[in-house]
Amino acid sequence: MQPAIQLRGVTKRFLTPSGGIYTALHDLDLTVAPGEFCAVVGPTGCGKSTTLALISGLEPPSEGEVEVFGKPVDGIAQGIGYVFQADAVFPWKTVLENVAAGPRYLGRTGKQARERARDWISRVGLAGFEDRYPYQLSGGMRKRVALAQSLINEPRILLMDEPFSALDVQTRSLMENELLGLWSSSAASVVFVTHDLEEAISLSDRVYVITAGPGTVKSSYQVDLPRPRNVAEIRFQPRFAEIYEEIWNDLRDEVLVSYERQKRSGAA
Amino acid sequence: MAATTGPAVRPVTDLAAKRARDARRRRWTVNVLRVLFAVVWLGSWELTTRLGWVDKFFFSQPSEIVLRLWVWITEGTALGPLWEQVLVTMEETVLGFILGSVLGILVGVALGRIRLLSDVLSPYIKAANSIPRVVLGALFAISLGLDLRSKVATAAILVFFVVFFNAFQGVREVDRNLVANARILGADNRRLTTEILIPSALSWILASLHTSFGLALVGAVVGELFGATAGVGELIYSAEHLFDAAGVFAGMLLLAAIALIAEYLITALENRLIRWRPPVATETRI
Ligand SMILES: Nc1ncnc2c1ncn2[C@@H]1O[C@H](COP(=O)(O)OP(=O)(O)O)[C@@H](O)[C@H]1O
Ligand SMILES: [Mg+2]
């Protein structure tokens, strides 16, 4: 079967402001099957966001190949949804206009776009808030807008960059469950970036552990927990604890490396 | 019961009422002091000129200025009815303001979007910005004549640079995440400009409109000083020729009134155009 996403030997270097070269990713291999929910975990600064930028086509790789459904990525491709780490809903558009933006950009009329947007707004539980501006919403609600905004274009690939990390615990597990619901009724492949291992395991079919920068895949794990899952409860299953321990053994070292580095550069 | 847990618990309404009372008292104090300031200032001006300590010939006198305005209103000025002079200056200002703003936004957005263009033009723009542009008014008076056009052009050139720099900066400072998001959602270049860059730059542009309306007024008046047959600037100019200090002051008062009205209108426009921004904190405070 052809993978939905394939990264082969991908290296990404950035020019730093001081003129040096910084290697963010080194020789990274990553495969996501169609319809698979894949989580990527790693310490801060290991290149998780960069990986998503490469898949989306926002950034080209310095070396290696990035393929989406068998085609090399060259610029921004259709059929990709992206929920950004930082708030990226348009502050001057209302909830309705924000969600309707995608279909309009893809050539639908304003009326059609708004109709579809209404539907998606109620699917993410924001019915009644259509006319609000983002500043009038809570952080959780803004994430819902971002989710609806990405999903309305019915992407075959959904990239999510620590989408729930700024939310409180209750809102977060609610949103995680809703995400799983929305995903299971679509055929999308998901790459879900997080630094929270618990979140990664409870959501995904597969977890990739990335090393402290320059990022490369340290290991990958199949998560064989049954679906449908309830995120709030799955953490109490014995199998969950086993998987957690196994992956944590890998992740811990990387987190420590990253932490030591930060401490040292902070002291310097 | 919660109310019995401690003496510090007081009804919320009590606190709110106290805060409202404090706010009212403060507003009242400010207003009284403002009036007092005007009374002291104008009163000492009137008194010192009446007593002859300060020469009325150079500094005029509040009562004389008010009288002059009254005469202008009731009997008209040497150039014709007062409202005509005000209207002429307003027309020049508003036209110059609109022309300068539109050009400033267009050029600013274009240069903000097209890197090559801005790299090529930046030294020329810096040079053009560093000359005192009011002197261009003299040039316009020669090339465009003494009618409306030379004043509009002077006002527009002053407005242009301010709006241009802000529009340019606004486009450059746009949040990279918003641009990335729009592109992922399928926005083409045109959509990116109209739906992301311009709205994002709008708060910069609007902030500059406050300053630039003032400059448009300066441009119009300076244009009139370089040669005109009507307008508040011309009124001031002819008063100056007659060594009529009261006339100069009365003209200044008119200009201040025009500027204040414009300020009010621009604030209204701003509130309409950026409804999506949270209201300023002072407005929401109880
Ligand atoms: N545009 C860029 N220019 C220079 N360095 C960058 C750029 N983007 C990311 N980096 C660097 O690459 C590394 C990985 O970044 P990122 O992918 O955002 O990490 P993560 O999302 O895992 O926290 C960081 O050290 C970051 O400073
Ligand atoms: Mg990141």
Image (tube, rainbow, N blue to C red):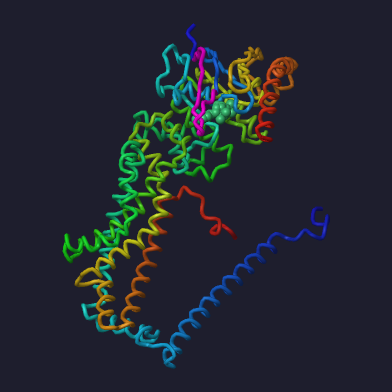
Q: Is residue A161 visible?
A: no
Residue at 50 percent of width and 36 percent of height: A88
Q: Specify the quadrant that holds the C terminus of chain A.
A: top right
Which quarter of the frame holds ligand 1? top right
Please indicate whether residue A262 sits to the left or right of residue A189 in the image: right
Residue farthest along the bottom direction in this orientation: B51
Residue farthest along the top direction in this orientation: A1
Image position, residue B177 (x, y; %): 48, 35
Image position, residue A233 (x, y; %): 70, 24
Asked if the magenta segment contains residue B275, the reply would be no
> Residue A124's quadrant in the figure?
top right
Magenta residues: mostly which secondary structure?
Answer: strand
Q: Is residue A182 visible?
A: yes
Residue at 74 percent of width and 15 percent of height: A242
> Residue A247's quadrant in the figure?
top right
Asked if the magenta segment contains residue A14, the reply would be yes
Q: Is residue B209 above or below residue A175?
A: below
Residue at 34 percent of width and 61 percent of height: B215
Q: Nearer the viewer, residue A173 or A42?
A: A42
Q: Nearer the viewer, residue A60 or B91?
A: A60
Range covered by the magenta-colored residues:
A5-23
Please indicate whether residue A55 sits to the left or right of residue B89 in the image: right
Q: Is residue A57 above or below residue B20?
A: above
> Residue A218's quadrant in the figure?
top right
Image position, residue A172 (x, y; %): 63, 32
